[in-house]
């Protein structure tokens, strides 16, 4: 029996990177996947194709996760198509890194809206479905910098710390209805974004990690499978660090 057999998941920002890895791992475990991204480009179509080849139901939706209206509209469409939502993975996120003295209001607002408001938008949109079902797992993508902060990332760190507070509060509100809410805090994960870093910077990062390597998107996706499945049925309100011991 596959761990997520016959469940349906919504994953935000899943056309590439960590989100795509989560979608593929979920499909591998028998989960139907509805995923969103800002636009349905070649990456999104390729992800959708890969999921369908795994024999599950899958569909890509264009949606701006930072828009309340857009989010509710897309969740309604997903419900019409899939009929249920068992897992929500709030993964959509961006960075606009710069020191606070140089940060514009626009850079602050954009990161807070895409990273933090999107979590409110999607959780709010699926809550009525999960409350009715009396079951569900909400998985929010935080970050090691949400726990520890990082110079040049005040906006990103604030958004990821906000996600942790939100996650713990939702766990308390929804727990009596069988709905779980947890966060994952990835550390230094090798993606397209971090892949652009100079070799010496990457080596410096890796030397600070007890496991002496950067993580992979699959490392994060495996943690999501655990939190989405019944294996974690008594775990809620937690932050699971996937950071090699950072």
Image (spheres, helix red, strand yellow):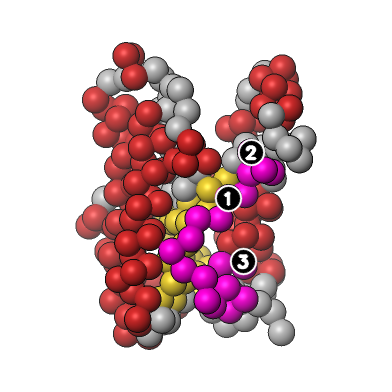
Looking at the image, tell me whether mark 3 or mark 2 is earlier in sequence order.
3
Query: Pointer 2 and pointer 1: residues touching (CB < 8 Å)?
Result: yes
Percent position of residue 29, x then y:
67, 73
Relative side of 153 to 25, left or right = left
Task: Point out the image quarter for the C terminus.
Answer: top right
Relative side of 155 to 5, left or right = left
Residue drawn at the location 36% of the way across and 41% of the way down: 159
The residue labelled by disc 1 is 241
Most distant residue in the top direction? 101
Residue drawn at the location 48% of the way across and 51% of the way down: 141
Percent position of residue 107, x then y:
32, 27
Instruction: Report the front residue among 145 and 103.
Output: 145
Looking at the image, tell me whether mark 2 or mark 1 is earlier in sequence order.
1
Mark 1: give few (<14), some (14-19) or many (20+) Cα within 10 Å.
some
Percent position of residue 204, x then y:
69, 22
Residue drawn at the location 31% of the way across and 35% of the way down: 110
**Cα distance in 3D space between marks 3 and 2:** 22 Å
Looking at the image, tell me whether mark 1 or mark 3 is earlier in sequence order.
3
Mark 3: give few (<14), some (14-19) or many (20+) Cα within 10 Å.
many
Instruction: Report the front residue among 89 and 35.
Output: 89
């Amino acid at each position: 029996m596959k761990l997520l057999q016959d469940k349906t998941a919504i994953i935000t920002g899943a056309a590439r990177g960590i989100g795509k890895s989560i979608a593929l791992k979920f499909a591998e475990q028998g989960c139907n996947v509805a995923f969103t991204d800002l636009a349905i480009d070649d990456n999104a179509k390729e992800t959708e194709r890969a999921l369908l080849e795994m024999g599950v139901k899958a569909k890509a939706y264009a949606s701006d996760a930072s828009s309340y209206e857009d989010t509710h509209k897309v969740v309604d469409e997903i419900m019409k198509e899939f009929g249920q939502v068992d897992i929500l993975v709030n993964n959509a996120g961006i960075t606009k890194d710069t020191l606070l003295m140089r940060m514009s209001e626009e850079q602050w607002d954009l990161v807070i809206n895409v990273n933090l408001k999107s979590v409110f938008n999607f959780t709010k949109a699926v809550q009525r479905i999960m409350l009715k079902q009396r079951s569900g797992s909400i998985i929010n993508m935080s970050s090691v910098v949400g726990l520890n902060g990082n110079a040049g990332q005040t906006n990103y760190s604030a958004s990821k710390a906000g996600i942790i507070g939100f996650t713990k509060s939702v766990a308390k509100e929804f727990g009596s209805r069988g709905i779980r809410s947890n966060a994952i805090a990835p550390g230094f994960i090798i993606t397209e974004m971090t892949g652009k870093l100079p070799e010496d910077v990457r080596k410096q990062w890796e030397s600070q990690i007890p496991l002496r390597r950067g993580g992979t998107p699959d490392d994060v996706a495996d943690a999501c499978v655990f939190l989405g499945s019944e294996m974690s049925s008594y775990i809620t309100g937690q932050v699971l660090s996937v950071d090699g011991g950072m």
